[in-house]
Amino acid sequence: MSILFTRRSAPEPQAGIERIERFLAAASERTHAQKAAEAFADRLPSLTSTERQQLVSLYMRERLAEAERRRKQVAQQAAAHSIRERLRVRCIKIGLLLGLFSASLTLWLIVGILM
């Protein structure tokens, strides 16, 4: 049995790559958060094992939450930049069209006066 991919059902390579990149970034952040939390807990030798586990867990949650806030902020900034860029391009196009219209109207008036 052969599977035919239509244009609509074919997976987008870029979307897959971005999904893998997000997964790897999240895994890396979890690893860094775990190491940082354990390093912090190691500086407090008087903790019981339960307290240490709770501290590591809390520290990791806070660090991962902060990383998520930063990721969202960067995504919002990128979206805002994209919108500003599209508006800038649109304004340039409108300016060019108005300039061409003005030049055409001026030329039409000059030709009309000369005739």
Image (tube, rainbow, N blue to C red):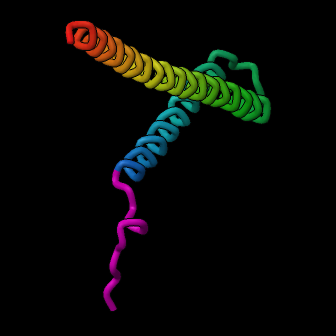
Picture residue at 33% right of the left edge, 15% below the top: 105
User: From the viewer's perspective, is residue 10 above or below residue 33?
Assistant: below
User: From the viewer's perspective, is residue 106 above or below residue 5?
Assistant: above
68 horizontally vs 82: left or right? right
Picture residue at 58% right of the left edge, 32% below the top: 34
Picture residue at 29% right of the left edge, 17% below the top: 104
Q: Can residue 38 be spotted in the picture?
A: no
In the rendered image, residue 6 lying in the magenta stretch gets the answer: yes
Q: Judge by depth and name the residue closer to the eye, 113 or 106.
A: 113
Magenta-drawn stretch, dominant element (helix, strand or loop):
loop
**Residue 40 rendering spot, x and y as whole percentages:** 62, 19
**Residue 7 rendering spot, x and y as whole percentages:** 36, 66
Q: Judge by depth and name the residue closer to the eye, 89 or 69.
A: 89
Picture residue at 47% right of the left edge, 41% below the top: 22
110 horizontally vs 22: left or right? left
User: From the viewer's perspective, is residue 99 above or below residue 42?
Assistant: above
Number of numbered discs on residues: 0
In the rendered image, residue 26 lying in the magenta stretch gets the answer: no
**Residue 51 rendering spot, x and y as whole percentages:** 79, 30
4 horizontally vs 37: left or right? left
The quadrant holding residue 75 is: top right
Q: Residue furthest front?
A: 115
The quadrant holding residue 90 is: top left
**Residue 78 rendering spot, x and y as whole percentages:** 49, 24
User: From the viewer's perspective, is residue 10 above or below residue 106?
Assistant: below
* Residue segment shown in magenta: 1-13
Q: Which corner quadrant holds the N terminus?
A: bottom left
Q: Can residue 94 be spotted in the picture?
A: yes
Q: Judge by depth and name the residue closer to the eye, 74 or 47.
A: 74
